[in-house]
Image (cartoon, rainbow, N blue to C red):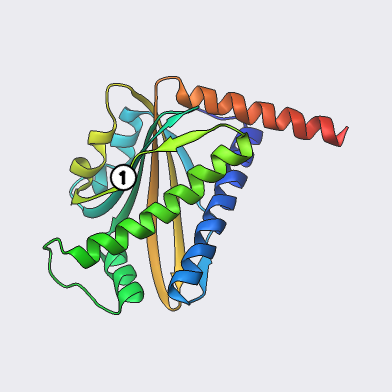
Amino acid sequence: MILRPEQMDLLQEVINIGIGKSAGILNEMIDAHITLQVPHLRIFSKQELVQEMEDLTQRYFGAVKMGFHGSFKGIASLLFPRKSAAKLVNVMTGEYPMTNDLDSIRIGTLTEIGNIIINGIMGTISNLLKKPLKFFMPAYAEGSFCTMLLQDFTAASSTVLLAQTRFFVEEHLVEVDLFLFFDVGSFDDLLVCLDDMLQQENAQND
């Protein structure tokens, strides 16, 4: 799916605001300055996603997943590469998990961070577009890219929005990927809302 430039620009702006809000909350939590890069946005169908991410299929990730419903319906999945997950846990807790086994500290820390980032972005989308959303409880899991992500591309999913970003926590570089899986029709509804917002902005500028 190809968005018009003005649609992509507005979507980028909305997600940037959400990322900024998330960074502010994380700043207060860990008492350290966080510098965020502007996320790179891409839109995929399932087939396009599989082809584009082929080199990641066997890589190991941690993921925080949260379903959303209301004006739009789908699943948000925030993926942490293994090194980035370890850095975050180290910065947040002072511990550096070296084992592959799941542990309560890592799960709790990454779930909390994922919850903040997903809520920051999806909450901003909901507020700025004035479309109410409700969220399920976040869940944490670990596994390969295929295991963690492609299972979220259910038969009802038609479009995925990928927001790739990097942020620096003190001297630590952290990379995360946010995948928003929209059920059939929901992404089209999102585009309609973006167009409505663009029309309102144009009317105010006239």
Residue 138 in the image: state x and y as whole percent: 32, 47
Considering depth in this image, is 203 or 136 the residue closer to the camera? 136
User: Which residue extends farthest right?
Assistant: 206
Q: Is residue 2 toward the left or the right of residue 94 in the image?
A: right
| Residue type indicated by callout 1 | Lys
How many marks can you see? 1
Considering depth in this image, is 150 or 116 the residue closer to the camera? 116
Which residue occupies 30% across, 79% down?
Answer: 94
Considering depth in this image, is 48 or 16 the residue closer to the camera? 16
Secondary structure type for disc 1: strand
Residue 145 in the image: state x and y as whole percent: 23, 46
Residue 70 versus residue 205 in the image, above or below: above
Which residue occupies 23% across, 76% down?
Answer: 96
Which residue occupies 38% across, 51% down?
Answer: 177
State the image quarter where residue 54 is shown. top left
Which residue occupies 21% across, 50% down?
Answer: 141
Q: Quadrant location of the C terminus?
A: top right
Q: Is residue 79 toward the left or the right of residue 22 in the image?
A: left
Q: Is residue 133 toward the left or the right of residue 106 in the image?
A: right
Crowding around mark 1 (Cα neighbors within 10 Å: few <14, some 14 to 19, many 20+) is: many
In the picture of the structure, the residue carrying the numbered disc 1 is 65
Residue 141 versus residue 108 in the image, above or below: above
Residue 108 in the image: state x and y as whole percent: 27, 61
Residue 97 in the image: state x and y as whole percent: 19, 72
